[in-house]
Amino acid sequence: MTVRGNNATPPSPAIAPGAEQIDPAAFAAELGRRTGGLGLDARIGALVPAWGASGGPFFQAGLAGYSDAAMRIVARRQGCPFCVTEALLDRALLAGGRGFDKADLESLRDNIPGGDEDHPTAGQIIGSDPDEMAAAALKMIEQAARADREYREMAYGRGGFPRSTHVSDLEHPSCGEERDEGTVGRRHEAAEARRHVGQVNGAGARSGSVTSCLRASVPSSLPYRTFAVIDVNLACPVKKIKSKARGGHWLAEPHGAIEILRAVRAAVPPEIPCTVKLRRAYDDTPEMARNFEIIFNAAYELGYAWTTVHARTVEQKYIGPSRWPFLKDLTARHPDKLIFGSGDIWTAADIFRMLAYTGVHAVSVARGCIGNPWIFRQARQMLAGQPPLPPTIAEQRRVLEDHFTISASLNGEHLAGRMMRKFGIRFAAHHPRAEEVRQRMIAVASIADWRAVLDEFYTPDADCDPEPRASASGSEATLPSFAPSALQAQ
């Protein structure tokens, strides 16, 4: 299957023969009864206790350009138990300065309203080089406890910088030999340092780790606020950087993917779970199907806690339906492994339909929660055996205002106004005058415009008798079509 273009297709059902026979409301209610209302595999709770305490076999995915702290906090207030950051580029994290801002949990906690609510969180990382990925992952977990120079030295050796600081000059082991003699020397020094650390530690699983290179210079305990999980992104269909893989392109290069997984798991302290986001293959050829199996099995052998598998290929990007039978077969062949599912989750009912149909242990909600944080509240209602209720106009306005307030603290009012325009277009789907509100949101060009839409449409008298958007079976109104050209839901 060859796919051209970057646009996402409108919300549509996944390919899942027989799924129409599933009653998601009945399945959700039974799951809730069996698990004391939590609906969560006990192994997940053991790995991430805060998630285990609140329950819920669903979470908010990382979405580039969307899932910042503001979106995460709003989702948590509606019942989302666990969130993933957008994919953070390893080299940006290591560069210092503002490159680490999105991973600085202490700053987020102290400087935005509701910052203390933003946990537990998985820090998702993406990149092209095992050394950079390992050092950046450690920096995220340690919350930059060391000087930026020290983390760079872990990745690059003495000097603390790559041969080039430009993103287009990233290199990885499977893309040819290094041509710069100085770079070769620095990489050799970094590798020797990791080998020495492995010998000192004497632990096979930790051999080659960068974790202890400078351990004496920092406290032995982890910061109070850190990431609960480090998630390696081997799924995002980003463009290749020259001939260098990143994200989902690693699914075509299993050796390089495994080197990254090994380096990150060795660098991150053993008490922090590492996980990996995958797609079902790079494309639909038998060779790429074999590559997926190689990487998937290697992840668990290296100690990764779970995989989140998107049921589209990398080549599909966000176009066309996902294939749930792939997930169903995968879980049947690996009943002992924690496997999470992703792809075409548009309603709370879809969460439980995927759980019932595929046997995955938790469901990643990506584009389906943009402008719809209530999907998590509705999923919790279904677990409790209750009908999933649509948000009232008052609830919609309160969430829109909360989202803006948090976003303004995080991004500044000007950028927050632009961001709320794209969120507002999606929030409009819940309004009884949905198309009219959507058109007004499209025309928003300033903060004043955005507030005018709220004052006109989100008032008590606007809460007229809309058509029901939910029923006891968990069905909801169809969302409007959209095709965001830059959306990347990893």
Image (tube, grey):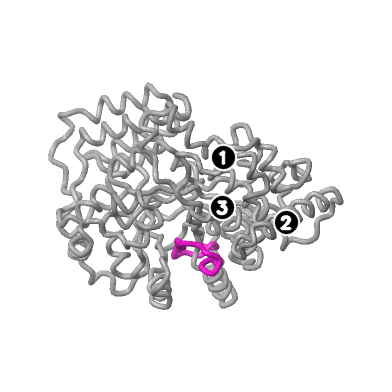
List the residue tagged with mark 3: 268
List the residue tagged with mark 1: 219
Magenta span main SS? loop
Q: Amino acid at mark 3?
A: Val
- Residue at 44 percent across and 28 percent down: it is 110
List the residue tagged with mark 2: 196
Q: Is residue 236 left or right of residue 469?
A: right
| Magenta residues, start to end | 299-316
Single out the residue that lies furthest toward the top: 448
Single out the residue that lies furthest toward the right: 181
Name the residue nearer the viewer: 25 or 485: 25
Contact between labelled residues 3 and 1, with CB atoms less than 8 Å apart: no
- Residue at 27 percent across and 40 percent down: it is 434
Image coordinates of residue 122 in percent, x first then y, are 46, 49
- Residue at 41 percent across and 29 percent down: it is 112
For disc 1, the neighbor class at 10 Å (few under 14, some 14 to 19, many from 20) is: few
Image coordinates of residue 409 in percent, x first then y, are 43, 26
Q: Is residue 158 left or right of residue 232?
A: right
Q: Residue 310 colored magenta? A: yes
Numbered circle sitting on residue 152: none
Single out the residue that lies furthest toward the left: 465
First-in-chain label (1 vs 2): 2
Q: CA distance from mark 1 to mark 3?
A: 15 Å
Image coordinates of residue 67 in percent, x first then y, are 44, 43
Task: Classify mark 1: helix, strand or loop.
Answer: loop
Q: Amino acid at mark 1?
A: Pro
Task: Say how many tags the image has.
Answer: 3
- Residue at 52 percent across and 43 percent down: it is 221
